[in-house]
Image (cartoon, rainbow, N blue to C red):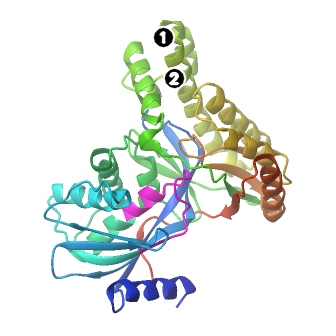
Amino acid sequence: MTDRHALIISAFERCFGGEPELFVRAPGRVDLMGSHTDYNLGYVLTLPISRDMWLALRPRLDRNVRMHSVHLDDTASFDLEALAFNEAQHWINYPQGVASALAAEGLALTGFDAVIHSNVPMSSGLSSSAALECATAVAFRELGGWELDAVRMAVLCQRAENQFVGVNCGVLDQYTSCAGEAGRAVLLDCRALSHRAVALADGLRVVIADTRALRQLAGSEYGERRAACEEGARLLGVPALRDLDAATFAAHEAELPPLVARRCRFVIEENARVLAMAEALPAGDRAAIGGLCAESFQGACELYEIGAPAMSAMHAALLSAPGVIGARQAGAGFGGCLVALVEADACEACATSAEAAYAAATGLTPSIFAVDAAAGAGVVAP
């Protein structure tokens, strides 16, 4: 038994008595390239990370679901017969939304008690909410005894966040968490809802730098960015920005309002960078990797305006650290994490250097750590 198993079993006994009967998990994720391309039906190069959400659970005989979050030290519950948005304990709306989406598909749901344990930093751009959604879907699937493939599960978890929680996110987070492959990045086609695995060349590691600057997407400018992209696509007569290449867009850019044009340019250029990065990583092309990361970060700050002072400080700290090939924003921006491609033998030195430089610049204590590519959501082996 691992220390993590033991900690969760102890928490379960305190909260609910007895022991859990099933452990399920779902990973967080980080985008290696492709900010805000998902809801524009483009491509994202994403990595399911070795930081994940665990649920330890035991079925109930009634229709109630009770969940205790170790991280939040909070217990909340809901009735499968009367799902309703919880204003007071917002985190429970993610599992509730999953229950609602699954029930709408006619899938049989069983009540359960569960302890949630996560080592995915919250509100940091690593998709802790999607990990909770996907782990909850696996829990209902295992207890209900029905089948649900990874892509369909991802779509239903996205629907939960869109329609129940009220965050108009794309499918990136849920798809990565459900369909990820151990040891591989995922080149996701958000229109086709398909992917291919992408290897990282030997000698490369992925390092995540959490600025500890919190993000709140439901109350941020995320929705405004999405609306601008949709307006740009409408004015240019295409279903989505994914349908435009840089040359075609440049020929018609002047037809758009300036703000809309800047937002669209970033997404179109970012979409091309995803495909370029998917070629550079397996080849270990350090120059291409560094250039693509630099272009992405600059566009995120200047065109899409999703930066934050803490992100700029961390970007500078990473670029000054040993072994760093390239660094860029992760997730939706507005704070949270950055992601860096680092020489494998320099990860520790990179973290030490960047932590010190960032702390000196901001007075904040960051969290910088290497991650590997993890398997998608499923049952945890005993």
Q: Quadrant of the C terminus?
A: bottom left
Question: Is residue 382 at least partly visible in the picture?
Answer: no
Q: Nearer the viewer, residue 129 or 67?
A: 67
Q: Which residues are magenta?
A: 116-134
Q: Which residue is mark 2?
A: 264
> Is 54 located above or below residue 171 in the figure?
below
* Cβ atoms at labels 2 and 1 below 8 Å apart: yes
Q: Which mark is residue 256?
A: 1
Q: Could you tell me which secondary element the residue under label 2 belongs to? A: helix
The residue at the far front in this view is 88
At which x and y percent is residue 341? 72, 51
Residue type, numbered disc 1: Leu
Among the 4 quarters of the image, the one containing residue 185: bottom right
Q: In screen coordinates, is 297 left or right of 119?
A: right
Instruction: Find numbered disc 1 in the image and state the secondary structure of the residue it sits on.
Output: loop
Q: Residues within 10 Å of mark 2 (few under 14, many from 20)?
A: many
The residue shown at (49%, 11%) is: 257
Nearest to the observer: residue 148 or residue 328: 328
Gap between marks 2 and 1 measured at Cα: 9 Å
Residue 86 in picture, x, y percent from top left:
28, 56
What amino acid does circle 2 point to? Answer: Cys
Magenta highlight on residue 139: no
Q: Position of residue 47 (x, y in %)?
A: 56, 55
